[in-house]
Amino acid sequence: MSSSPHRRFARTLAAFGAIAVLLSAVASPPDSYTQIVYAAPLLLLALLLSVLRSYTDALEAFERDGSQ
């Protein structure tokens, strides 16, 4: 069953966002400001990867080229 791109985007962003927040919590000291500083770039990367995965075929083309 194929889902809409918007639903796929939301699921992907939630997953990548959770991973980004967890990585920043593990890698940074227990200071809330530092955790935000660590998490912000990772969340932007999560947003970019979610858009690429949901609305373009850029990641699929990258995977196809890498498997040959």
Image (spheres, grey):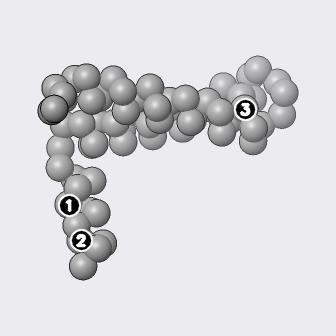
Quadrant containing the C terminus in the rendered view: bottom left
Label 3: which residue? 25
Q: In the rendering, at what x and y percent does residue 19 appear?
A: 56, 36
Asked which secondary structure carries label 2, the reply is helix
Cα separation between marks 3 and 2: 34 Å
Label 1: which residue? 61
Q: In the rendering, at what x and y percent does residue 66 appear?
A: 30, 72
* Crowding near the residue tagged with mark 2, few <14, some 14–19, many ≥20 C-alpha atoms within 10 Å: few
Q: Nearer the viewer, residue 62 or 28?
A: 62
Asked which secondary structure carries label 1, the reply is helix
Which amino acid is tagged 1? Ala
Horizontal arrangement in the rendering, residue 3 relative to residue 16 (left or right): left
Horizontal arrangement in the rendering, residue 43 relative to residue 65 (left or right): right
Q: Residue at x 17, y 49 (%)?
A: 57
Quadrant containing the N terminus in the rendered view: top left
Q: Is residue 44 visible?
A: no
Cα separation between marks 3 and 1: 32 Å
